[in-house]
Amino acid sequence: MVTARITVNGEVMPISPAAPTTTLLEFLRQWGFTGSKEGCAEGECGACSVMLARPGIVGRTEWIAVNACLIPVAALDGQEVVTAEGLGTPEALHPVQRELAIRGGSQCGYCTPGFVCSMAAEYYRPDRVAADGLADSEHGPNGFDLHALSGNLCRCTGYRPIRDAAFAIGTPDADDPLARRGAAAPPEPAPTVLEQDGRTFVRPATLTEAVTLLHTHPDADVVAGCTDWGVEVNIRARRADYVIAIDQLPELRVLHVEPDRFELGAALSLTELERRLAGEVPLLAELFPQFGSRLIRNSATLGGNLGTGSPIGDAAPALLALGASVVLAGPAGEREVDLADYFTGYRRSVRRPDELIRAVRIARPLARLSGFHKIAKRRFDDISSVAVAFAIDVDDDVVRSVRIGLGGVAETPVRAYDTESALSGLPWSPETIEAAARVLEAEGTPLDDHRASAGYRRAMLAQSLREMYARTTEGAAV
């Protein structure tokens, strides 16, 4: 579609003749914006990081950092992108670039433009200054959150000067054009049709249009944040004939906090949920920082994480523990399915080919005790070997209700029903925990693979319950 346009560093340019699977990174480099690099092609290194203008949580518009290697440029019709080249020049460096330069934060330089864009997005975060003076190991005295750089990899191990530069940046000047952009309305999502060589990318304007298209094209790829789809395109050379983008559908971007439940739109990014919920669902607040990196969370969605049906998706165990349900929308209307009944096999579910996940619902009141335990080789930005989520109510030292969600131990995310039975109605005591831990280590069907052995997974299941007890009981020993 020749009218598809994208704004890069203030310049409007056509998206055509890009193919439906052309990533933003490929597009930028073809136009000469070679600061953005391809390092991993799967969203783990951040060498391709750029900034996008998105609807704000504090202001009207906010700049967020994303992985350009994962997003199809067709998904950015009508949107605004800023690369490292758009932040400053050799003669007039941006404040972030200047701090990196004078503090020795760039060595080989390959990763530097990505660090610059991730740092600049944090530099422009409207509520960053609210943390001023609350410095700790992960936050600077200027309010800079180091998690903003959790998806950026420096192969020269230059992290200390990079951190120093991050903690030294000030606040944007009043006349900074990128800061002023926050006071204006965000770019409107543009209905898009991009066709080339028999392949089509479509951005419908409404949910009704989306499910109609999906009914007509049941084999279409449905994309939102593209954090999974982009890997399939880059690493496995997937080339779908029909792609439907749903990330900007208003019906999928709602967040309702009601007396009896939370309703979380399936297309809201995890960062949007994290910031807008502001800790109101403690179990999700514990999950979010362990889910990928900030770059991934700026794009990834709950709908996408559940829609893939992966047994190692981190959201599912937490949502199972919360007793969540999914709202499925199709041509015949909506239906609500308990998440415990949603998965039917490896990457399979009860969702029909012409249905979309519209929202996730979590009933209130929430359990008083909750915890999310992720066992992985790295603290952040890694795939779980095992993920365990707990939601427990204890009254007068007796377990009144309990739900436990597990990931990585079966062909689907599962509820640990046997362990729940072994805890329910019994004293919240070391004896009960030890007996239930032996039950928990037998839940699921763990296997041996390159991430962990089956025996290790079983041991970690049992240990997670002991740790949960220790965390919630004064003086308890693990």
Image (cartoon, helix red, strand yellow):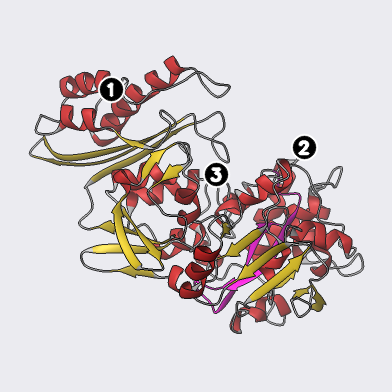
First in residue order: circle 3 vs circle 2:
3
Q: Which mark is residue 137?
A: 3
**Secondary structure at numbered mark 1:** loop
Q: Residue at x 68, y 73 (%)?
A: 193
First in residue order: circle 3 vs circle 1:
3
Q: Residue furthest top?
A: 455
Q: CA distance from mark 3 to mark 1?
A: 26 Å
Q: CA distance from mark 3 to mark 2?
A: 22 Å
Residue carrying label 2: 155
Residue carrying label 1: 477
Residue 49, position as x, y percentages in the image = 72, 56
Residue 469, position as x, y percentages in the image = 26, 30
Viewer-closest of 205 and 112: 205
First in residue order: circle 1 vs circle 2:
2
Quadrant of res 7: bottom right
- Highlighted range, magenta: 45-67
